[in-house]
Image (cartoon, rainbow, N blue to C red):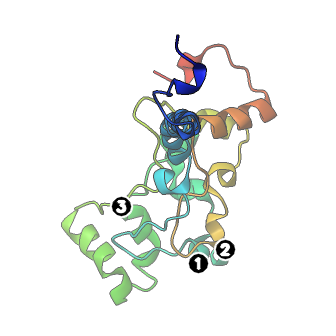
Amino acid sequence: MHSLARVRALFPPWTNTATRAALIGAVVIGAGALVAPMLYARSPYATGQGDPVLQPIAFDHRHHVRDDGIACLYCHDGAERSPYAGIPPTERCMGCHAQVWNDSAAIAPLVQSWRSNTPIRWQRVDSLPDFVYFDHSVHIARDVACATCHGRVDEMAAVYQVAPLTMSWCLDCHRRRAPNRTTCSVCHR
């Protein structure tokens, strides 16, 4: 007959603790692998929020909007009638700059663009994913102020993306304003 005292355990007692710790660690790592990309996609690192965008010509909105009183829709007149706000053509800028600061080195690229009839390649500041359809004219018609999405551009030396422009950010605004929404296909085409 065998006595219980003589039976030896296959694994030492500390392996139970190690197994529990390994299982808990695997669950935490697995959850982290799922949550981390979602958090990153909403972070300013991924959305570009707060990063000034360098333009081919140093354009100070503070001077043009605040000091000279030029309204957003004067330069970005597409916002009233189309999905895209648009960038003003060189001719619009030269409407003033043919008379004011026309010999300044700061606007030499603008004058060169005008003379050569070559558009300036401005860099996009606010960018949405390709699968999202956003119509500026609908928002302008509903009296959504430009600053709602673009921030106080009249206080920016170099324009940067203010809002995260994530789906949850857009949905939060729509919930607050309660617009007439029928289907998701209005924005997602």
Give 118 or 36, whichever is nearer the viewer.
Answer: 36
Determine which of the numbered discs, if any, sits on residue 66 in the image: 2
Q: Is residue 112 above or below residue 13?
A: below
- Asked whether disc 3 touches disc 2, contact meaning CB atoms under 8 Å apart, the reply is no
Determine which of the numbered discs, if any, sits on residue 74 in the image: none
Task: Say which residue label 1 marks.
Answer: 63
Residue appearing at x 64%, y 69% in the figure: 154
- Label 3, secondary structure: give it: loop
Q: Which amino acid type corresponds to the residue marked 3 in the rendered image?
A: Trp
Q: Is residue 112 above or below residue 31?
A: below
Give 44 or 58, whichever is nearer the viewer.
Answer: 44
Residue appearing at x 46%, y 47% in the figure: 127
Mark-to-mark CA distance, 2 and 1: 6 Å
Residue appearing at x 60%, y 57% in the figure: 162
- Asked whether disc 2 touches disc 1, contact meaning CB atoms under 8 Å apart, the reply is yes
x, y percent for residue 184: 58, 18
Q: Mark 3 vs mark 1: which is more N-terminal?
A: 1
Mark-to-mark CA distance, 3 and 2: 21 Å
x, y percent for residue 167: 59, 34
Asked where in the image residue 3 lies, by quadrant, the reply is: top right
Task: Say which residue label 3 marks.
Answer: 122
